[in-house]
Every structure is written in structure tokens, then in C-alpha cells.
Amino acid sequence: MAKATLSLIPASLDVLAEIKVGNIASERVASKIGLTHQHTNDGIMEWRRPKSWDKEEEAVSYRVLLLTSSINENNNPLQAFLEADAEVRTLTIVNQKFKAEDISGKFDIAVSYGYRYILRQCQLDEIPIFVNMHIAYLPWNKGADPNLWSLISRTPSGVTIHHINSGVDTGDIIAQEKVEFDMKEGTLRTSYNNLKLAIEDLFYRSWGAIKNGTAPRIVQDQNAGTLHRMKDKKSFFDRITPNGWDTKLSVVLSQYDALSDLND
């Protein structure tokens, strides 16, 4: 498992980002915008602002925490995007559980994208802006496997960025867009990948409002929509996906409908 950098939060304002040595995509982005770097004993590379930037006024800067399922991947466009933002003072990436005291007073913004652990209210209270990126058109398909459930339940498919509260994907909405599936050639895997591309693009367009605190807060109807857990598909998933996640969406839907008819 890749090592989380939570314990390596830099004290110096000169440190822009911490990334694993060998992260080629991130190194390329950092080098392109003129950063210098030094290695630490923990195999982490600290990217620092060049001395030529010292004269520039740092009136606005943000300490960002990125919660994700994995860290330091060679192809992580969200990480590269945040690292390239000159207003991001530090970027710390975490894929493990942590305590509220670990983050207290250390971050201005937290972004959750594919993070696999439930966040408690005491953790949310430690960071002023805490947002989540969910590949569903909320309030439909909160929770797990939204691309599957939007397909078989014939509910809207899309992506949503929302403020996080103590519920499961129930926080106020910042931005969302519908995404149509390719029912002719698309598979569960390609639908998932397309939703990821869509929400990353939506994040890029929403980031300015998120970081300066002007992002919208559209309250969700807590009695509307749907919620699914990982276990909810266990009883039928293998029966409707002969090729697993590479099964065509049209096949998944027809198999599910046939199975439903048998159970009626």
C-alpha cells in the first residue's frame, strides 16, 4: 500500500506539494511551472517555490487535503491540477483512516474523491471547506456503484460535487451535470470512466468558487432519491454481468430485466 503523507505536512510556506518519488505525471507538471525539489528520507519529494517567487505577494494561498482511494499514481489529473495551482500552498494526499486531531488547524480545504472511509462529524468540523466528488446525479444513487444503479433502476445518471455532512452523499450541492450512457457500445467500465472524466472536468470549472468560499449550497431533499450499499448488488451482480465490469450496458439491463421478471 502506498504511504499516506499525513504525518509529513510541511511547516514551511515554501513547500507547495508532497509527492512520491517517481510520480512522473506530477513531476512533469511541477517542473513545467518552475518548481524546485528536494528528497526527504521517507521517499517523499517536496516541491518548493523558486526564489524568484519570493518577491511575489502571497495574499491568497490554500492548504489542501485530498482524500482518495490511492495516492501518488502516475496518472492522476486531479492531483496534477491542484499541484499546478499557484494558490495552493500545500497539497497533502491521504488514502488511509485518520483522526480529527491529525488534521486540526492544518488545512483550509478538503476534497474527497473516491475515499473509502466514512468521515465523522468531528473530522468535518476541523476543516472550513469539505467537499465530495460523487459520480451520481444526486439525490439519486447515493452510496456505492452509482453507474450500475442508475442503469438498472432507470434513474438519472450524472455527476455531483457537494459539501459533506454526516450523511451519505446528502450534503448541499455545489454543482452537478447529467451524463448520458452509450447504450450501444458502452460497458460498465467505460460508463464508470466517462463519469470520472465528467466529474473531474466539473471540478476544474468549480474549483475557483470552492476555494474562495463562494460555491453554491443547494439543499438536497432528504426524502428524495435513492441510496445503495456495496452489499445490495451481491445477490444478482454475477448473474447480469457475464463479462464482469466489461459487460455491455445493454446486456446488463436486459439480464436484470429478465431476472426481475422471474422474481415477480
Image (tube, helix red, strand yellow):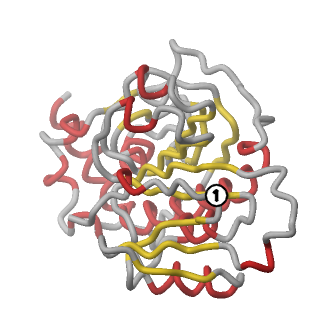
Q: Residue at x 38, y 61 (%)?
A: 249
> For this view, does 81 lie left or right of residue 45?
right
Q: In which quarter of the image is the N terminus?
A: bottom left
Q: Position of residue 126 (x, y in %)?
A: 51, 28
Q: Where is residue 3 in the image (x, y as percent from the top left)?
A: 27, 63
Q: How many labels does the image show?
A: 1
Above or below 79: residue 96:
above
Residue in the foreground of this view, choosing between 56 and 246: 56
Residue in the foreground of this view, choosing between 148 and 211: 211
Q: Which residue is drawn at 57% across and 87% down?
A: 28
Report which quarter residue 13 is drawn in: bottom right
Report which quarter residue 166 is drawn in: top left
Residue sticking out furthest to the top: 223
Residue in the foreground of this view, choosing between 11 and 261: 11
Q: Which residue is drawn at 56% across and 64% down?
A: 78
Using a 10 Å C-alpha cutoff, classify the residue at mark 1 as few (fewer than 14 neighbours), some (14 to 19) or many (20 or more).
few
> For this view, does 52 lie left or right of residue 104?
right
> For this view, does 51 lie left or right of residue 30?
right
Q: Residue at x 52, y 78 (%)?
A: 26
Amino acid, disc 1: Leu
Q: In which quarter of the image is the C terminus?
A: top left
Q: What element carries label 1?
A: loop
- The residue singled out by tag 1 in the image is 13
> For this view, does 206 lie left or right of residue 23?
right
Residue in the foreground of this view, choosing between 142 and 185: 142
Q: Position of residue 135 (x, y in %)?
A: 50, 48
Above or below 27: residue 192:
above
Q: Position of residue 144 (x, y in %)?
A: 34, 41
